[in-house]
Image: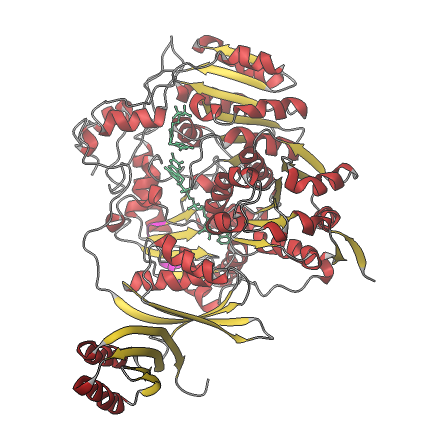
Amino acid sequence: MTRQMTGAKMVVQALKDQGVDTIFGYPGGAVLPIYDEIFQQNDIKHVLVRHEQAAIHAAEGYARSTGKVGVALVTSGPGATNAVTGLTDALLDSIPLVVFSGQVATFMIGTDGFQEADTVGITRPCTKHNWLIKDTDKLADTVHQAFHVATSGRPGPVLIDLPKDVQFAQGEYVPPQKAKKSYYQPKVKASIEEITDLVALIEKAERPLFYTGGGVINSGPAASQLLRELVDTTGFPITTTLMGLGSYPASGKGWLGMPGMHGLYEANMAMHDCDLMINVGARFDDRITGLVSAFSPGSTKVHIDIDPSSVNKIIRVDLPIIGDVGHVLEDVLKVWKSRGRKTKSAALKQWWAQIETWKDIRCLNYTNSQTVIKPQYALERLQALTGGMDRYITTEVGQHQMWAAQYLGFEAPNRWMTSGGLGTMGYGFPASIGVQMAHPESLVINVAGEASWLMNMQEMGTAMQYRLPVKQFILNNERLGMVRQWQELLHGERYSSSWSESLPDFVKLAEAFGAKGILCSDPKDLDDAIMEMIKYDGPVIFDCLVEKHENCFPMIPSGKPHNEMLLSAEAEAFEGGGALV
Amino acid sequence: MSALKIEKGSSSHSVYALRDPFAEREEKHTLAVLVENEPGVLARVIGLFAGRGYNIESLTVAEIDHKGHRSRITIVTSGTPEVIEQIKAQLGRIVVVHEVHDLTVEGAAVERELALFKVSGTGDKRIEALRLAEIFRANVVDSTLESFMFELTGPSDKIDAFAELMRPLGLTELARTGIAALARGTA
Ligand SMILES: Cc1cc2nc3c(=O)[nH]c(=O)nc-3n(C[C@H](O)[C@H](O)[C@H](O)COP(=O)(O)OP(=O)(O)OC[C@H]3O[C@@H](n4cnc5c(N)ncnc54)[C@H](O)[C@@H]3O)c2cc1C
Ligand SMILES: Cc1ncc(C[n+]2csc(CCOP(=O)(O)OP(=O)(O)O)c2C)c(N)n1
């Protein structure tokens, strides 16, 4: 039986058939037929954002916190170009999105029509794949393909550009079960030889380290479970990138914290000195490797990744394993158990003793104050007061993001949403909206810097309209803090344009939207203020006035090896102030 | 801040690592890329090379299977072994790319290029051009009283050599197709 319907109706039908319950969008002339269809149904909820960039970030937050695909809808021309930052963000962080953009009618394409932009051309390098649909009969099949491509292999954003006449025209609807089988079928299972080679390395290792990343989260909750089992039964230490936080619990006994530029001393030293590095779904990002030629010089390196282009891109590895983390870890556990669960326990003990001496440096120590709130202290208190709750954290980009990664603890995957690869200021607030839409009963907090937060502050309107009780926890240092830090350390303390001038009164700003504003500047008031924020049933802007010139440590300046970290004054004092080589 | 021994205020350290100046030796590789013949597929491949700073020395593309929607793109590129490996992996992850073959490493391959030469001249030069064309087995595909158009097929260095010889004899225009290549043998 064939079902005829308009292209616009097909979009909505295909979304329903794909199990979509929420989409984020902003209307305009070129998508009005779709908005008309959305109006006439109740299965899919549309969230009207206040800027298309926010629609994409909200969809990212929704996707990352649920493991499902995020969906967004924008109009042609400016709607599509506003979406570009979000698409690039999702591409770099491997977030599955399906984005629909309106387009001028097919017969107008190429004429510089009103609100025409070459959307597939502009978004080709910032999507995993994109399509311009010129024939309504192909629309439904393409939507199903789009979901397949967004979620298969290494996930990523895809875009479908829909000319207005295609939305109006009638065509034949194809349900997902009848869609053409896609030729895009990335490999998910590794060969038994590769698995056995890895197990043999595990059995021999004296100073092993798991270096795990976002790929574990991408692979789904089962992968995190398998990772925990493998780490705990082998007794190996583990470090997890910014994108992988939560895949292994922060309270787990193998946990060394995050590695990299602002990673923990013990994590970076272990990276540098290990003899076996097992990379599970991480991509040797330059924030991690530092000076490539000096990266973990003495280790045998294994890399489990679903994308062959991630392997040997930056660091040459000895054993590449192409496959899905979940599948590979399952096989590794099987083989390792069947071979008698062997590890070199005496050597491991020594390795852990070495790691303990690194931990003793206490690299996250800082000088607290009775009079000003230190940003680290604010996050420690936030962790103490909310750590046990059903909590999701998003962040903006800057020092506060790094402190959040260092001082908050994540026990489960999909609880931490941050812009890692692109580092997009303005990501966190809309992302928190997407997360809250997916988890209406949970506590959702966006840890923000005041400068980043202003980049998408218009979303207060969205939060109010949909009664989303998102908590905007702004560590307000009245500085573009991360930029200021680099200028202090590397540009002769010439603070070129890194002051946040003319800031709004955030409490009044909250009130202007009908939300709650809380100002806190005294460390003694902080706990009560945080509790007030949590208890309030509605959006809150929390203006936390913090120390203005705090630097984020540890820090490995780019182009430096792991064992040349800058530490806070406290940690250095412990070390004796000597060079950490 | 003693750990790193950087002077406060020195700007010799960048936020971004700068490229290693000791570049490795570059190799030339011929790649055959089988793609779904859909709009924009060539733009994806070229965009990849442009966006990631890879070299294209020659590129040819044409549909090879109309029913199966397949096109074949032949690319000659150069780079360090690491870069070549990345190029292949990056091509492979384009959703509409079905297969990537490195003809340079997958065994012997035949590489051919077709070129058209317009050579204008009279008298001795004209006779010499025709004589050389015969030696190179170039065909005359058009002629006027003052010019010839030659067609020549062969490996690129043969075309280069012929072009060098024609230059002093009045080469006015040259069109080359770029390389088409296939692996030798049955499969
Ligand atoms: C200001 C700032 C500072 C930063 N400092 C740090 C820092 O100190 N430390 C740090 O860690 N990061 C830091 N980052 C983040 C950094 O830029 C990168 O985003 C991050 O390190 C990349 O994480 P990842 O390696 O886990 O890779 P991701 O970007 O999460 O990539 C995932 C990898 O896993 C693979 N993959 C995906 N799905 C699967 C699957 N199912 N199976 C197998 N493999 C899969 C992908 O192909 C990819 O290679 C910083 C970012 C900012 C903005
Ligand atoms: C859209 C965008 N523009 C510029 C930057 C560069 N940048 C990185 S961090 C930062 C400062 C962020 O300041 P703020 O949000 O106040 O956070 P803080 O570092 O003070 O915690 C800037 C400008 C960026 N990451 N994103």
Q: In the depicted view, which residue is nearer to us: A93 or A254? A: A93
Which picture quadrant has residue A436?
top right
Q: Which image quadrant is residue B141 in?
A: bottom left
Q: Is residue A223 visible?
A: no
- Whether the magenta-drawn stretch holds residue B180 is answered as no
Question: Which of these two is toward me, B116 or A177?
Answer: B116
Is A407 situated above or below A136? above
The colour scheme is secondary structure
Q: Quadrant of residue A488?
A: top left
Q: Position of residue B58 (x, y in %)?
A: 34, 69
- Image quadrant in which the C terminus of chain A is located: top left
Indicate left or right for B127 with A524 as reference.
left
Most extreme residue toward the front is: B145
**Tally of numbered discs:** 0
- Specify the segment rendered in magenta: A200-208
Residue B65 lies, with reference to residue A355, above or below; the image says below
Residue A170: x %, y % from top left = 76, 54
The quadrant where ligand 2 appears is top left
In the displayed structure image, the side of residue A201 where residue A338 appears, left or right: right
Image quarter of the N terminus of chain A: bottom right
Relative depth, front residue between A242 and A33:
A33
Q: Nearer the viewer, residue B131 or A293?
A: B131
Relative image position of residue A80 (x, y in whole percent): 55, 41
The residue at 25%/51% (across/down) is A297
* Viewer can see residue B106: yes
Q: Residue at x 43, y 32 (%)?
A: A405
Residue A205 among those drawn in magenta: yes
The spot of residue A372 in percent (x, y) is 38, 11
* Residue A213 as seen in the image, left or right of residue A295: right
